[in-house]
Amino acid sequence: ASVDYPKEFKGFAVQTPSEWNKPKLTSYAPKTMGDHDVDIEIECCGVCASDLFTARAGWATNWDKKGSPQVVGHEIVGKVVAIGSKVTSVKLGERVGQGAQASSCLSCSRCNKDNEQYCPGMVGTYDSYYPDGYLSQGGYASHVRANEHFIFPIPQGIKSSEAAPLMCGGLTVFSPLKRNGCKPGAKVGIIGIGGLGHMAIMIAKALMTDDNNKFDGEIYAFSRTFSKKQHALEMGATHFIATAEKNWHVPLFDKFDVIINCASSVQSLDINAFLSTLGVEKKFVTVGLPDEHEKYDVSPKSFFKNGSYLSSACLGSREEALELLQLAVKHNIKPWVEEIPLSEAGCHSAMSRCWDGDCRYRFTLTKFNEFFNT
Ligand code: NDP
Ligand code: ZN
Ligand code: ZN
């Protein structure tokens, strides 16, 4: 470890929204070390579209208002290099992961029911304020510090660069699939075959496979065009629909138990058509979060015809993260990753290409130890 550690972390920080894809190498003080905090020396970090929305200030972000540089990245894998005095769940030297959450109150009614991602005191891995006013900083960095509750041991047999995308993207689709009846026999729709969507297909397939290793059910991949068809079928989709085709929804009347929408924009999303494909009282769950100004265009009559629900979901709980990692080992779930070595140019390329949709299907920034000499 470097001599400055742990006084200063180093990371690639976005300076201003107009320079969203050109983060610069910066040093900064970590948050104050808490009794339950853990420091991770980062080995690699996935690039989630949320990093881009935050960097571009397309959402109502905190960092741009404060005018302080922001390190994004919340699909982190690395090694534990320091622990607070009360930490019990991880050991020094252990390989661990962290997703999009760094802290919560851990004592409210939601935290007590494995819904800590919905805690009013939720602190995100970046762009969130701790109670003392510290603005959290993410994983395109040498180190990250977070509460042990949000740090997960990575089982042997999963490669770090493939474990990283499970930490945010994988967990975010696993949780609503699991909570909404994705099991053997189910009929599931996945919209938007990007980072989250491609993991959703593989995770749905695993959830719909029984103890005798028999898959039962239907997984529909919905994409704007046919370009990802072959890939989606390889990932485990049983059907593929290009939503640019007219009247695609008509034969799918009353089909789905749940639809998970992973698209990062509602621009070409015909939500009324999707609702018509749900069974009675079934759910359309959006995990995709577009720019703040984008709105749904949906008529109450669309819900009235099948009593369907329009819903959303945020991340997943610690319990679900641990469960997902076990599922990934059991079913050999491997995100389709393109590795990009960490550097200023590497961050620039990964962020730009992800925004342009030029990604099959997740970038993981790698070789952090080489770059930071850790
Ligand atoms: P990607 O860019 O990897 O994938 C997004 C997919 O959305 C694309 O592959 C594309 O699918 C579809 N899409 C892109 N542009 C449009 C458009 N203009 N109109 C309709 N569909 C479009 O992003 P991620 O998978 O990393 O993230 C997806 C979304 O999920 C983001 O909004 C992200 O912020 C959000 N997110 C939310 C979380 C939560 O807790 N709820 C956690 C993590 C991420 P196709 O080519 O198949 O049409
Ligand atoms: Zn994310
Ligand atoms: Zn709480």
Image (cartoon, rainbow, N blue to C red):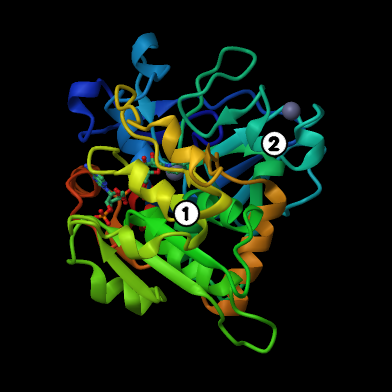
Q: Is mark 2 within 8 Å of ligand 3?
A: yes
Q: Earlier in the sequence, mark 2 or mark 1?
A: 2
For image coordinates 48% across by 29% down, the residue present is: 8
The answer to whether residue 230 shows anywhere in this view is: yes
On screen, residue 284 versus residue 225, left or right, reads right
- Residue 186 in percent (x, y) is at 57, 69
Q: Nearer the viewer, residue 373 or 359?
A: 359
Q: Look at label 2 and name its amino acid.
A: Glu
Residue 309: which numbered mark, if any?
none
Q: Quadrant of ligand 3?
A: top right
Mark 2 surroundings within 10 Å by alpha-carbon count, few (fewer than 14), some (14 through 19), many (20 or more) = many
Q: Nearer the viewer, residue 24 or 166?
A: 166
- Residue 210 in percent (x, y) is at 66, 81
On screen, residue 54 versus residue 243, left or right, reads right
Residue 116: which numbered mark, if any?
2
The answer to whether residue 13 shows anywhere in this view is: no
- Whether 366 is drawn above or below 232: the answer is above
On screen, residue 114 versus residue 137, left or right, reads right
List the residue tagged with mark 1: 259
Query: Is label 2 in contact with label 1 (beta carbons under 8 Å)?
Result: no
- Residue 360 in percent (x, y) is at 26, 63
Mark 1 surroundings within 10 Å by alpha-carbon count, few (fewer than 14), some (14 through 19), many (20 or more) = many
For image coordinates 55% across by 17% down, the residue present is: 134
